[in-house]
Image (spheres, rainbow, N blue to C red):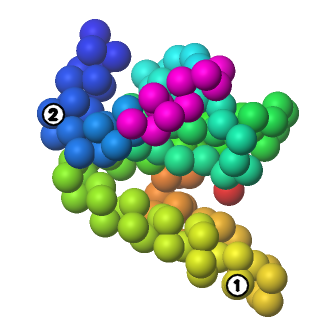
Amino acid sequence: MKKFLYFLVQCTWGLGQTIIGFVYFLANIRRPHKMYRCAIETRWNWHGGLSLGPFIFTPSTDGDFYDGVCVHEYGHTFQSLLLGPLYAIVGVISCTWGSLIHPRLQKKKNVPYTACFVEYWASAWGEKITGEKAVW
């Protein structure tokens, strides 16, 4: 029942990000996929992760880093459930932080990835929901 409600909300309230996530899923259709709790996880060739609706994309590595990225990205799926169409704001902040701001701050001041509130929020929710440790 939980999975049904999860997908129902992602495909209605979170429809925008779910459609974009499905496009990314199709673009990576030859990559390995599996269910990660309620989300559809795809392993891709990027170092980082991405979460769009019920779709999470994780690095193709194994071990603690991979496990932690799954937890973090799963936390983003709950932001999507809560915020619905407003999740686009989280997406813009997250992408800007992860690709432009954090790499520069990391080099100069060793700032953690979770210094950005949306990333901290995703890790905190992922850890609370899964009982596992997020990488960031």
5, above or below 94, in the image: above
Q: Is residue 122 visible?
A: yes
Position in image of residue 129 (x %, y %): 49, 34
Crowding at mark 1 (Cα within 10 Å: few <14, some 14-19, many 20+): some
Q: Identify which amino acid the numbered label 1 is placed on.
A: Leu
Give the structural element (helix, strand or loop) at label 2.
loop
Relative to 59, 124 lies left or right:
left
Q: Quadrant of residue 130?
A: top right
Marks 2 and 1 sit apart, C-alpha to C-alpha, by 37 Å
- Please indicate, yes or no, whether residue 128 appears anywhere in the rendered image: no
Q: Quadrant of the C terminus?
A: bottom right
Q: In percent of the image, x 47 and y 44: which residue is there?
A: 51
Q: Which residue is mark 1?
A: 105
Q: Is residue 128 above or below residue 32?
A: below
Q: Read off the residue under disc 2.
A: 12
Q: Is residue 5 left or right of residue 53?
A: left
x, y percentage for residue 9? 21, 31
The structure residue drawn at horizontal position 57% and vertical position 38%, both measured from the top left corner, is 57
- Can you say which quadrant of the picture contains the N terminus? top left
Residue 113 image offset from top left, x and y in percent: 65, 67
The residue stretch that appears in magenta:
23-32
How far across and down, in percent of the image, does residue 21 sit? 39, 39
Q: Amino acid at mark 2?
A: Thr
130 in the magenta segment: no
